Image (cartoon, helix red, strand yellow):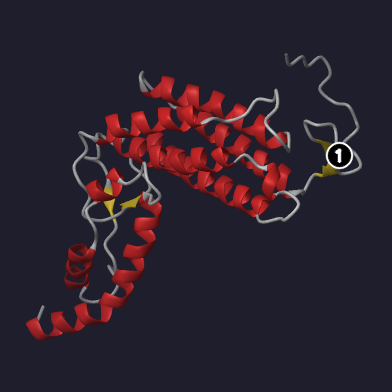
Amino acid sequence: MVRLDRIYTKTGDDGTTGLGDGTRVPKHHPRVEAYGTVDELSSVLGLCIAHGLENPYRAYLVDIQNDLFDVGADLCVPGEKGDRLRITPLYTKKLEEIIDKENEPLDPLRSFILPGGTPQSAWLHVARNVCRRAERCVTALMAIDAERERVNTEVLRYLNRLSDLLFVLSRVLNGQGKLDVLWKPGKRQSPGVAIARQCDSSLPSASAAASRTSGSRSIDSVRSRAMVSCAFNLPSARAASRRSGA
């Protein structure tokens, strides 16, 4: 049971902090960076909730905030599971169930989304990016030989799936995707319309991408591939546009 009766202890004044197993490490240690970023993510979700959300969306985010404290507790204590609080596959499964339910009524995307729209949607886009940063912090921690076997890999799966859920919810809270503003590749380059059409035809269906969120490929990995594809298609789009006189 957590009991906080003193807010300051002065033990961290030397630039170190205590992990859950009692060891002390520098405050810039990759493990501290990982669970600190998870805490930051929870704070961003709090901002989204504070902008006014009705259930079930408020309940989703409050439950996720509670999950994130569990994630932080897991990361804070290195080593074997034992009697410690650890993230299990059930956490990730719950996220996948929400993704499947909320993504089903959304129209397929023909391009990617510019973050914005309603305040709640915009904050969820911020949260999604902080979640991806938390995921990178965990993979950086796992890349350290001495830490690799002391990180619960289920934490990584949870964060990966959570970023997908936050993307889906950002669309839901943008009027079920009706307020989404789509990316127009090469818009500043003349003629932009032809370029956008060229890239638009090369982008994978977002519904297909979303259906893979429960697997190894997420919407972010699909986005990266599509951006590269469009970048290579820009010159041909411009040439085709000049030939057509557009």
| Residue 81 screen position, x and y as percent | 67, 31
Q: Is residue 118 visible to the viewer in this orientation of the structure?
A: no
Q: Is mark 1 on a helix, strand or loop?
A: strand
Q: Vertical placement of 52 versus 234: above or below?
A: above
User: Quarter-wise, where is residue 106 in the image?
Assistant: top left
The percent position of residue 199, horizontal first and vertical second, equals 23, 67
Q: Name the spot of residue 144 as percent of width and height, x first.
A: 71, 55
Image position of 114 (left or right of 78): left
Instruction: Name the quarter where the C terminus is drawn.
Output: bottom left
Residue at label 1? 24
In this picture, is 205 found above or below 121?
below
* Residue located at (54% from left, 30% from top): 88
Judge left or right: residue 94 versus residue 40: left
Q: What is the quadrant of residue 164 in the picture? A: top left
Residue at 67% in and 37% down: 75
Task: State left or right for residue 134 relative to residue 215.
Answer: right
Left of 182 or right of it: where is 26? Answer: right
Q: Which of 173 and 74 is in front in this view?
A: 74
Tell me which residue sits at (21%, 54%) in the image.
110
Where is 227 relative to 44, above or below? below
Q: Where is residue 135 in the image (x, y as percent from the top left)?
A: 55, 47
Identified by mark 1, the residue type is: Arg
Residue in front for this viewpoint, 86 or 3: 86
Q: Quadrant of residue 156?
A: top right
Q: Badge 1, how many Cα within 10 Å: few under 14, some, many 20+?
A: few
